[in-house]
Amino acid sequence: MNKSEYELLSPSEVTCLLVGTMIGIGALILPNDVMATAKQDGWISVFLGAIYPLFVMFLSGYIIKNYSEVNILNLSRKFFGKFLGNTLNLLFSFQFIIICTSISAGFCNILRLYVVSFLEPIKIFIIVFIIAAYTSGKGLKVLAKTNEIIFYLTICMVILPIMALKDGSIINLSPILGINMKNIILGSKETIFAYAPVEAILLLPAFIRDKNRIRGSFFRAILYTTIIYTWITFITIYYLGPDIIPKCLWAFMLVTESVKVPVVTNFRFIFMFLWSIILFKTICNEYYFITFVLSDVTRIKRKIINICIFPFLIYLSTLYGNEAQRREIISAIVPKLTLFNISFIVVIVLIIFVKKVLKNEKGSIQKI
Amino acid sequence: MKKVVSRKYKIIISVLGIIIMLVLFTSKQSYKPIEELDIANSLGWDIEKDVNGDVLYSIPINVFVYKDYKQSGTVVHSGTGRNISETRTDRQRKSNKTFLLGSEIVNIISEDMAKHGLEFMTNILFSNPTINDNSISVVCQGKAQDIMKFQSKEYSSAGEYLEGLIVNMQNYSFFSDNYNAIDIYTRQKAEGRNICLPYVVINNCSLQIDGMAIFKGEKMIGKLNMKDTVLLNILKENDVKGALSLTESSNNSISFEGISKRKVKCSKNEETGQYEFSININISGTVTANTLYKDIATDPKVQKQFTEDLEKDIESRCYCFIDRMQNEYKTDLLELGRNAAAKYGRNKGENWNEIVSNSNIKVNVEVKINLLNRGQY
């Protein structure tokens, strides 16, 4: 692959791309997810949830170290043969399809709830996917730059609820570690959805300028995401208390009420408007990854696939239904997908490892 | 020269633009001018007895009337029914405009409704996404509808007047700013917490605060007068402002204004399972007027004498109040259970109202003079 220096991603762009891939609708429902088991210690669960992306980081670091120019799709074809490899690759892309459609379904639900109750879901989906298809059609570099800009917006949006610190109370969080450790760890299992699509890094090695710094930018991405997630959960529990969060479908939205801006009667609309930009970006990222995998598997040009999957994704998004149904579907599917992904990566790592050992033995025998 | 926007992009952008316009503006939604909307500035919550022993909810709303693009007064529309849909249907029957929520500033709850329970109201307010969660809630004597219809000359609506009234109670009566809808959500079903809301009456042709309505769970159990309200606020709220005084006669008195800070410590006797609470109150402020103590502006000893007297006075009144709370209301009005739950674990099925009523509560008051104004005349 001969890419000019300009088209390759810089380390900070990789970081922002990964943060952008993770932070989406998950941030808004995270407090609800962990609340059921971990109660007031939910924020610790969210913090512990970072173990999953760290594990992926460890594995992918190993893969990229050994094969820095090819992505995981090529590797799987190389190791498992063309047919089995491509089947596994398709299964690998399922995660992006599910997350892309479920985020847009959730986006539609929250948007219709708070802002545009008069729009039908299908209309929202059409606009969301037009934007996603357009941005993803522009290529990875543009996507990464978009992510970089929106990353700063994300930080601003997340810091704003700091105003809730004066209204809430630390009493809501205590006793800290009052729930036993088992429940906290069970709660951190619920955060997988929020950290899920981080495996996308394995598609990208060929596009990254400085291979040695991948691990650093990956680690930074996980660090930022974990801090943002933990902060969101912390402030929500701090402001509302553990008894109220399960009653509210979008608990973090109630916290944004505490931001009182002069002249603006209701900050919620501004928050919703800015947060939808963040969601658009996440959907664009997933959309790009779907087209990337599909074009790699089918050998059709990415631009054509970009347009072809557009109606298909809209159709899938409409299937989720209301918020409770959507969450049930996600909690049923995402753990299985994650299990598949992680075992897929682990198997590839094992094959690389075994090959290396065999090669070394051969080498040592020849030397003698 | 290469064009900045090539022809291809022009086509793509215009096609996308047309699609977006088509999608967004082909909905049935009609746009209405402000004169054709019922924009509620306050909501009322009344209750009526039904024949078969059930209750009927009556929800009046106070809306602005616009004429020739100018606000020209308010009118009250009321709807009655056994649930929210029936009240809305009933209200729409009597109004020729579209009902719109979102800019309401006050929830006026009638005393009967509060005694019946707030469940109905909280449920509706919580589930509605367009509601203003920062609207202030008050309990009123009589019917909410009458309070709404009460029109003073200076203010365009009862809602606006009440909002100012509650906000400014923070100056002299140790009121906090926690009487909003969101505070009701976070208190009503939270462990170890109880709601209290300002109580409003019409007296001598003016709307005024006449104490505090206190709740046990979702039901109102009583009303405190102004003197008790001040004590409740001192004991319950942290970082609130108010005025205190010692009076011998109207010629001999001292007035003090300050900021009160409150800290609660909780301990549990492991053997008997008894809880013990100590409330530390720290009031620091200004002597605003004094005809009781001589040379208070110049002599620190006199100042000490005064602070000790005031401390003793507040403490004895606080103990009196706590005694009534534990024996008469049997409720944890001071949210002490919240502190205990935070220290000894949540969700253990403890009845904090009962525990606090039977436990030992200590009050330590400390008064500090940090400003002496200009001196003593």
Image: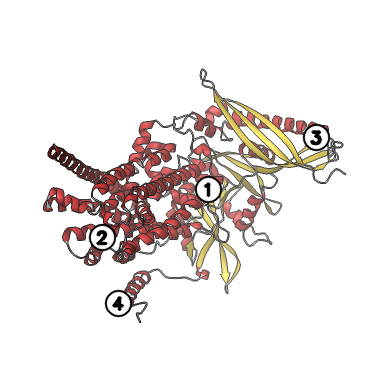
Q: Secondary structure at mark 1?
A: helix
Please, what is the three-letter code of the amino acid marked with disc 4? Lys
Q: Nearer the viewer, residue B157 or A356?
A: A356
- Tell me residue B330's x, y (percent): 57, 30
Mark 4 in CB contact with mark 3 (< 8 angstroms): no
How far apart are the two marked residues, 4 and 3, measured between alpha carbons?
Answer: 85 Å
Task: Please state which of residues B352 and A179 is positioned toward the viewer in this rendering.
Answer: A179
Element assignment for label 3: helix
- From the image, tell me which residue sits under label 3: B303
The x and y percentages for residue A139 are 30, 64
Circle on res. B8:
4
Labels 4, 1: one chain: no
At label 2, which amino acid type do we have? Leu
- Are the residues under marks 1 and 3 on the same chain? no
Q: Give how far apart the Cα atoms at labels 2 and 1 are.
A: 38 Å
Bin the neighbour count of mark 4 within 10 Å (Cα to Cα): few under 14, some 14-19, many 20 and up: few
Tell me the quadrant of the picture where the C terminus of chain B can be found: top right
Q: Chain of mark 3?
A: B
> Which of the pair A77/A266 is nearer the observer?
A77
Q: Identify residue for label 1.
A: A164
Q: On the image, numbered disc 2 is attached to which residue?
A: A313
Q: Amino acid at mark 1?
A: Ala
